[in-house]
Image: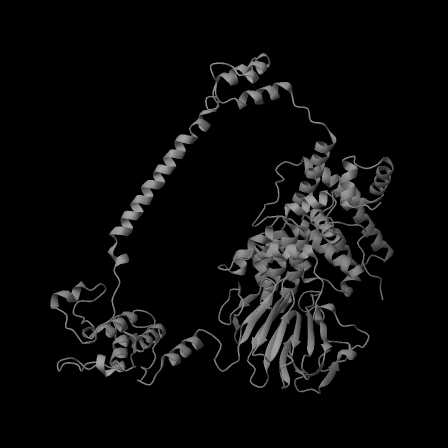
Amino acid sequence: MRLTLRTILAYLDDQLEPIQAREIGERISQSKEASALVTRIKEVIRRRRVGAPELAGPGSGPDPNLVSDYLENVLAPSQVLELERLCQASDIHLAEVAACHKILTMVLGQKIEVPEATRQRMHALGSRKAPSAPSPTESTLQPMTEGIGNAVAAQSLDDGLPDFLARRKQSRFWGIGLAVVVGIAWGILVITDQTLWSQPGPLSEEDLVARPIEPDQTNSVPGRVSGESEPSNRIDQVSASVSQSDGTRSQLAATDTVSSSVDGQSMPANGTNANPSINPPAPPDAPETSSETDLAKVTNSSEPPATTRPPSDSKTSTATARQDVAEKQGDPVPNVPPMIYVAGDGILLHLPSQKSVWKTIPLQTPIGIGDEVAAPEPFEGRLNLNESVELELHPGTRIKRLSSPDTTLALSFNRGQLVLIRPAAMANDVSIDLTVQGRQWRIELLEPETRCGVDLVLAEPDGPPGHMSELRPSGGLVVGKGRIRVSEIGQEATELTVADGYAPWPKDGDAMSPRADAAVPLWLLPEGKFVTPAARSLAKLYEREFVDDLSVVQSIGPVVKDRRASISDLAVQTMSLIDDYHELVTALHAENEEARTSAIRGLRLWLPQSPEHAPLLAEELALSFPEDQIAPVTRLLWGYGPDDARDKATSQSLVEQLGDPELVIRELAFYHVSNLTGRSHDYLPMAPLPERKAAINRWEEHLKRNDGTLLPAE
């Protein structure tokens, strides 16, 4: 019989046959993990204020139907595995499953006896009125309803209620009355507000003719300085009002206003209507108006614009003005083919070129030059560049679009798994410039329907600056279908096909050298990787945490502290993908081990990317760590290499930090000693103190066997 969470719960609730119970008991006694889980189950059930998973929103758990199916042993095996992992990682979910299992065992296995007094009182509460003559039922129950039963039956239900409950009807009537009064007041305000019911009519011919303003009306215009003249016509009024905004928006609004339609007729830029029948000649004393004079008024207004631009002539069109503003705002230049977000299974993050805030974007959003795009775990995204090349962004991928004057597309590849696809209808070759860790590669898709996979895994540092070795990323190129030509800029090109296998990233100056024995990864195949129903449910839960109107930090930052281990872990991975070190430092104190481990890895990937990151990390650590812990945490985040593992002082220091009172230091130390040696010696940073001490003794024995070092001397 397998030792699973369900069998452990059945063993604890005495639901197994004697032979099975004996077998499971022996296995639990022989397994430290199972014994620890049994102790943890008993502890979380008795713990007060452990809470329960929310049904929706932050802190929500899996569908309650999944838990019920699990308890009834009808859940799919793949979902059983995911749910048991969630329970082992989260006390709140483990308490829910264990407590529900115990309650069902008690309800289904024991007969519930209802006291006679309780039964009589419930019958008495059921009679809401006291008739003059007792009914047969009441006469039958009367001998049994003595004491409390007679007192309850003699009173109405409302008479027996406490005062704070008896006044609920009265407070309800007050609430209804207040709502009625507010509704009547709102209706009166709407009816008496003339601005809501009056609509400006179309401009007539007289409106286009200059009208002098009476002297006593000059100062009555809101916001007008004494002595300032009114614009000559209604079009000039619009231009004057626009002058109070910034220069770019004012000129664009003025241009749009001049070229707008009046009674369905288009107005040219010189201020006259294209239809001479509704554009009568101005009277002799009317001043001559033109676009130059209008723009001069805008420039010479009492509030100067933020930026100055030369006045446009009559040939300047609205499209030109809009194009100028779009270029100032960083929108894609019209001559550059747009790259569109065309498909995805959840969330895609976007950082515009002139912005510093990541946000989610909807489908059909264009990606401009300088924009960054990221697909957080566990979502994928698909981009299309003018039907010439398609891009698949797998979970954990981040790219940046660059200017590409000589190629179809230019990208800066930050990390993740990217698939480049040449559509079947594309007749010409597709060339893509790809910048990876400062090195520029050119990839040419030589055949239609060619699929090229690009994999990039960032390297973690193995020491502080000046001591760590060269950080070389892992990953490379692989062809899933068709044929490509790849070359580093200025180097000889190499052709790759499906038969050539996987080509890892070479050292500086070397060409691509494929490995024919490597198979095509599953993520590169058109059908992709198999996604379990439990993983899809988890993705749906995490997708709900994103808020469209908020930035990623505002919506996902609080989720880092979520009680659900899987959701918290995904939130930390998202913060790592966008290099938000503030939330990563916060996640070092997260409740779940998975989130803390992801935060450690995220900080270690972010730290060596720039010399400015080290002082930023020190400032951030000072906000949440004691002063004496900042230096050891920083040193542990920089990491250690094989040479450090052969040093006696460093090896002894790492083993001593396994017993540090601070959990983060213990986890960082174990992170390094386990990675360097490939061993764990049954050490768990969160285990009780006696178990940790026993594991530390085994690590000390490890040092003695290797002459005081973690790794033996070469």
Q: How is the image coloured?
A: one colour
Horizontal and vertical percent position of residue 633: 65, 56
Residue drawn where x is 73% and y is 51% of the image: 76
In front of the other: 68 or 246 = 68
Horizontal and vertical percent position of residue 453: 69, 74
Horizontal and vertical percent position of residue 592: 66, 50
Give the quarter of the image for residue 587: bottom right
Quadrant of the rendering where the C terminus is positioned: bottom right
On the question of residue 438 being in view, the answer is: no
Residue 248 vertical position relative to residue 190 in the rendered view, above or below: below
Residue 580 vertical position relative to residue 389 in the rendered view, above or below: above
Residue drawn where x is 40% and y is 33% of the image: 171
Give the quarter of the image for residue 456: bottom right
Residue 511 vertical position relative to residue 50 in the rendered view, above or below: below
On the question of residue 448 being in view, the answer is: yes
Give the quarter of the image for residue 457: bottom right
Horizontal and vertical percent position of residue 458: 68, 68
